[in-house]
Amino acid sequence: MYSWPIKPGWEPLPHQRETTAFLVQNPRAFCFNEMGTMKTLSAAWAADFTMEWEREHGKECRTLVVAPLSILRVVWEFAIFSHFMGRRKAVVLHGSANARQKLLAQDADFYIINPDGLTIGVPDRRGTPLKGLAADLAARDDIRIVIVDEAGAYRSSKTRRHKAARSLVGERPYLWLLTGTPTPNGPQDAYGLAKLMGLTNESFTTYQNRVMYRPNGERFKWLPREGSERVVSQLLQPSIRFSAEFLNLPPCTPEQREVPFSKEQADAYKALKKFAVHMIEEGQMVSAVNQATLRMKLIQVAAGAVYGPEKDGVKPSYGLNPSPRLNEVRSIIEETERKIIIFAPLTNVLNMLKANLTEWETEIVNGETPLGKRGDIFRRFGNPKDSLRVLFLDPATVSHGINELVTASVAIWYAPTDKSEHYQQGNKRIHRPGQIGATKIVQLVSTSTEKEIYRRLERQENMQDLVLRLAEEGR
């Protein structure tokens, strides 16, 4: 009989119990529970039960958690500390390579590391021995359980991090891959997950041709074949999925607000459209890299802070006086009683927002924010009585597993991301269990291209050829 360790005032939900039982019964499996269903705790319970069972049968058993850097402490370490209450010890493997080795040598139940940390000591050349941290991990036969949280980091099998994971964790007796979005970009995403789990020996090219096709012989565009969903479903097994619909959360309303450009933004946008036309005429628009660069430049113009050419290793940022958009943000904050989070995918934009919106106490969380400070910021924001009112967030760094943001009732997308996974999961930070009131997602837009970006984000569609719309406007 399992005791379900959980912090006072909480109760395991039925779907969490079922998810835990599924993982325990399936040593190598996928958990595709939707964002906000608290699959982190389900996986931790499954590991806790399994470690105890293994030890009762004479085997030392510990757990390695591989998760995004942004949630090593604020989600996983905190969850184990607050729910297991001294029953289990967790160690975060972060810092220099030497520091991580020393942390791994400590006696603990859970070792927590980020995907790129797992590559330390893994050589680029095949046949070369593992070194340092990688060698130490490979020698740890007692680490029998591996939980990969937000397994989307391993969708591409060609990356160094994927090869390192296959080498170090792919053969462990228990391997649980967690993600609420296994194939956000199409059926090709399933290949890397299946490869890590050891479910396929098929080459990626063969698999891609089996589930996708090029329309009219186009070189760079791929579309899913009919029946590809069935192929993916059969490949990624055994798996479990619960949606968030049955949780009966308060309503979450999307809202789009049109905001005019300042003169400086309008002039920059006009120049950008001319450049897009030039790229088409020169045949440069076929490059996915060129399209992505132009897309990000559009987002910078809309946000009102544009990066210039790099000088001495530093990229200067130039303001475009986005006063209409800033004033709209002020209006939204003033008409909102509870806390607010504001998303923008660029550091210069986040810094610009903090420098301008000084009427309230604010903080920034992005890739430059130290892990310890992130935890302090989220704990403050999670306290409804704390004076911290507004968070400026890079959606890439807070899109996974963080529960403290439910104190906010509004999420403003000051500027869009171009990754649907970051958009969907960012919104789930306020629309998840623990939310006590109705929530609103506000998109600020000034152009038809921005509207199209949000339409694709909501439908989880690819951004391919999006900037062609920008070029057409410039003709």
Image: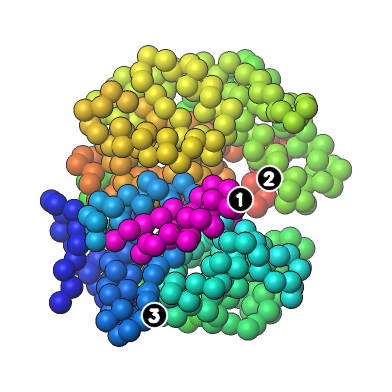
Q: Quadrant of the N terminus?
A: bottom left
Any magenta on residue 106? yes
- Asked if the residue at tag 1 contacts the one at tag 2, i.e. Cβ–Cβ closer than 8 Å, the answer is yes
The three-letter amino acid code for the residue at tag 1 is Met
Q: Out of 89 and 304, give the one closest to the viewer.
A: 89
Residue labelled with disc 3: 27
Element class at badge 1: loop
Q: Out of 193 and 66, give the one closest to the viewer.
A: 66
Q: Position of residue 99 (x, y in %)?
A: 54, 50
Image position of 279 with respect to 389: above or below: below
Q: Quadrant of the C terminus?
A: top right
Q: Earlier in the sequence, mark 3 or mark 1?
A: 3
Horizontal arrangement in the rendering, residue 180 relative to residue 162 (left or right): left
Q: Residues within 10 Å of mark 2 (few under 14, many from 20)?
A: some
**Residue 384 lies in quadrant:** top left
Q: Which mark is residue 463?
A: 1
Residue at left 37%, top 46%? 74
Residue lying at the far left of the rendered structure: 9
Q: Position of residue 18 (x, y in %)?
A: 24, 72
Query: Residues under labels 3 and 2: Cα distance?
Result: 40 Å
Residue labelled with disc 2: 292
Q: Residues within 10 Å of mark 1 (few under 14, many from 20)?
A: some
Q: Position of residue 196 (x, y in %)?
A: 55, 73
Horizontal arrangement in the rendering, residue 379 relative to residue 463 (left or right): left
Query: Residues under labels 3 and 1: Cα distance?
Result: 37 Å
Question: In the rendered image, is residue 392 in sight?
Answer: yes
The three-letter amino acid code for the residue at tag 3 is Pro
Q: Earlier in the sequence, mark 3 or mark 2?
A: 3
Horizontal arrangement in the rendering, residue 28 relative to residue 83 (left or right): right
Residue at left 30%, top 42%? 404
Query: Residues under labels 2 and 1: Cα distance?
Result: 9 Å
In magenta, the rendered stretch is 88-116
